[in-house]
Image: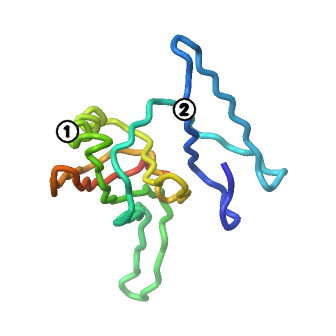
Amino acid sequence: GGSAYGLNYRYANIPITTVAQGAALTVEVTLTRDVSTIAPLLAIVGAGRAFGVGDTEWGVSPSILSFSRRERDPNFGTVTFVKRGFAKSLRATCYVDTSLRLGDEVQQILQQGDGMTLFYDFNNDGADYERLRIFGFYTKFDMQILAASYELLTLDVEGLVE
């Protein structure tokens, strides 16, 4: 929820911290818009178990993969734009605190998500950057063991076409 600089968020991460064992989980979603004449839209709602794998204190690079095309006329130089979709992409370098989660456990969690679309939120507690949330799949992960208590995880994620 919320908005920033007049742009509405496209993703939201709402942690549910406690659910009684055996209890049914019910989630209610209410959609509103700043402009009352335009109906709000909802594409996907997902619920699942969250796993923290590291902290992104530095080295997060969001970008997009553009599928639009520009065609330039070879005789006159005019340009025709063909608007197509885009996909978010992101490369993150994460600090893995092995006193909280072992590097082997982080790798096993990532292996379980191989070949699947997942919701990634690279915001740390208190941060709220829309561009650090992405629904997609990882294309590469790399872990560096720098010390017994210090590991680095580099993760490349590609989103689905929007």
Q: Residue at x 19, y 51 (%)?
A: 143
On the image, the x and y values in percent for residue 144 come to 17, 55
Q: Quadrant of residue 63?
A: bottom left
Placement of 15 over or under 33, stated as above or below: above
Q: Earlier in the sequence, mark 1 or mark 2?
A: 2
Vertical order, 71 against 17 (above or below): below
Image side of residue 92 versus residue 151, left or right: right
Give residue 147's quadrant in the image.
bottom left
Residue 146, given in percent of the width and then of the height, sits at 16, 57
Instruction: Please provide percent x and percent y for residue 114.
Output: 27, 37
66 w.r.t. 138: above or below:
below
Q: How many numbered marks are there?
A: 2
Local secondary structure at mark 1: helix
Task: Write down the quadrant of residue 51 in the picture.
Answer: top left
Residue drawn at 41 percent across, 50 percent down: 159
Callout 1 environment at 10 Å: few (<14), some (14 to 19), or many (20+)?
Answer: few
Q: At 22% across and 54% down in the image, what residue appears?
A: 150
What amino acid is found at the position of numbered circle 1 in the picture? Answer: Asp
Q: Position of residue 43 (x, y in %)?
A: 59, 40
Image position of 111 (left or right of 125): left
**Residue placed at 38% from the left, 42% from the top?**
52
**Colour approach in the figure:** rainbow
The numbered disc on residue 17 is 2
| Label pair 1/2, CB-CB below 8 angstroms | no
Crowdedness near tag 2: few (<14), some (14–19) or many (≥20) residues, C-alpha within 10 Å = few
Residue that extends furthest to the top in the rendered view of this protein = 22
Q: What amino acid is found at the position of numbered circle 2 in the picture?
A: Thr
Residue topped by disc 1:
104
